[in-house]
Amino acid sequence: MLWLKTLGAAFIVSGFGAYGLMGARSISNRVEQIRDIRLAMGFLEKEISYLHTPLPLALERAAQCTPEPARTLFFECGRTLQDRQGLTTPEAWAQSLEKLRTVADLKDEDLELLRTLSSQMGMSGVDEQKKLFGLVQEQLKIQEEKARREVESGRKIRAYGGFIFGATVVLLLL
Amino acid sequence: MIPNCKGGVNMELKDEDIIKNNIVPYLSLSIKEIILKMKTQYFKGLEEIRLRSGQPLLIKVGDKDYALDEQGNIEEKLKRGYVVSAEDIYRSVASISDNSLYAFEEEISRGFITIPGGHRVGLAGQVVMKGHELKTIKDFSGLAFRIAREVQGCSSEILSHIYPRDLEPVSTLFISAPRCGKTTILRDVARNLSMGTARGRGCNMVVIDERSELAGVYRGRAQMNLGPRTDVLDACPKAQGMIMAIRSLSPHALITDEIGRREDIEAIQECTNAGVAVITSIHARNIEEAEKRPLLRELLATGAFEILVVLSRRRGPGTVEEIVRWDSLCCG
């Protein structure tokens, strides 16, 4: 009977611990993902302002030099626009953000920031586009800083917290 | 009188194909559905599709405007037509520009965007100025889809005058009111002279297409067939283009549309003195009206043009009213 209790306790502690570790990793991943999106935005800005590349192609090129999962956002949006199904950029971008939500570790506030970009993306002159992408990159940098601070404080809490919470549950059950 | 190029059932089908393949994909979904419901017979002679925010959807067939209702029926009473929304305009602009207005800044500042097939979409909206120059248009309120057609062979009978047997092409001025088919004929002249005819070999041609109408260039490629020996200077001011062409492209003849400024006149004289024929057009209903414009009177008096061709719409676009040997008239 003791071995069964020990095994159960081990399962509970390791289960909560693993959950905590995943949470900790998610916090770290968010920083990486925001940075990847910011760099891709910089690439997109250069494609638009210097080469005047049409948006669907510029998004595809930005996707090519961006790692997953951030790549999903640019690739999906570029592909949707290239399909010429009558969708506008805000609609295609919103669809891609929903896909990104399922595969990335971004928070709602990050996604909301990216959503605000879409109403202007592509639909003004080069100077305005440059300002828009500059602003978005600045805001992403701020989000990245915030996320980085959260990593410092939150990673240990989540990583150890999971095990501690698991152990507390075991104690209560005993 | 040179007969017009006539179209029958085949022409209707061709027009329908052109509109369905080249124009409809750029319209908003609701307008797309309306145009696709339109009866085949209305596609023939369809010259324009007009979208104005808050106004009925209009089409121009020949000289008449008609509204289109939601079922794609033609309505003479315009108020019965489908009312175009601001969203229809936005979606169409997004589609025309590939969601990339920044890539069309130059075209927008000229007031139109050329789409594949060489069709032009005229833009209306709020104009933004920078100093004395038009910088861009924003908050679009109206779009005019002008359907470009190639009518191959429409210049074949004028051609014997422009390109006499075994000789070089001669300088020719087309005199025409707007919408009388001069651009279509100039395009066909360019193609025929470039390809060569039974009367003579093909010539090196340069088309100076300041308003992107003759060649319908889209992303650097002419959408109209202008023949194998034709170079296009797209969006190039006429006067500068003519001088540039005779210096660098060694043409037998130059083709350009709608001259009228002093620098155009000077460049034409430069070209004809250099032995290069200039085939061009002006807006006027007849020779008398053209001669009332001081600059043109001056140009015509120099004998720069050997032939004048007067066009009208009397029997449809491209009706040739008169062909005049001007060199013998003006210079004895």
Image (spheres, coloured by chain):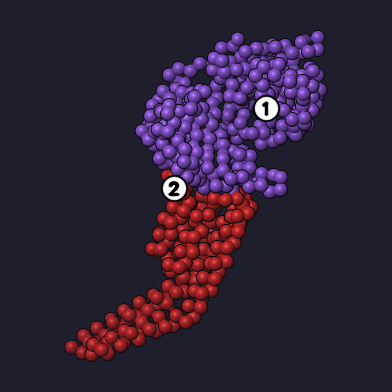
Classify mark 1: helix, strand or loop: loop
Label 1, label 2: how many angstroms apart (C-alpha)?
A: 38 Å
Q: Is residue B234 left or right of residue B245?
A: left
Determine the image quadrant of residue A10: bottom left
Q: Which residue is depicted at the point 33% across and 80% down?
A: A16
Q: Which quadrant is home to the N terminus of chain B?
A: top right
- In terms of depth relative to the viewer, which is nearer, B78 or B176? B78
Q: Position of residue A99 (x, y in %)?
A: 40, 59
Q: Is residue A80 above or below residue B274?
A: below
Q: Is residue A146 above or below residue B98?
A: below
Q: Are marks 1 and 2 in contact (CB under 8 Å)?
A: no
The chain ID associated with circle 1 is B
The residue at which mark 1 appears reads as B258
Q: Is residue B319 above or below residue A56?
A: above
- In terms of depth relative to the viewer, which is nearer, B30 or A45? B30
The answer to whether residue B242 of the structure is visible from this angle is no
Classify mark 2: helix, strand or loop: loop
Q: Position of residue B318 (x, y in %)?
A: 58, 18
Q: Which residue is depicted at the point 66% across and 21% down?
A: B284
Q: Is residue B87 left or right of residue A9?
A: right
The answer to whether residue A31 of the structure is visible from this angle is yes
Q: Amino acid at mark 2?
A: Leu
The residue at which mark 2 appears reads as A87
Picture colour for chain B:
purple
For disc 1, the neighbor class at 10 Å (few under 14, some 14 to 19, many from 20) is many
Q: Amino acid at mark 1?
A: Glu
Q: Which quadrant is home to the C terminus of chain B?
A: top right
Picture colour for chain A:
red
**Closer mark to the observer between disc 1 and disc 2:** 1
Q: Position of residue B84 (x, y in %)?
A: 45, 40
- In terms of depth relative to the viewer, which is nearer, B265 or B227? B265
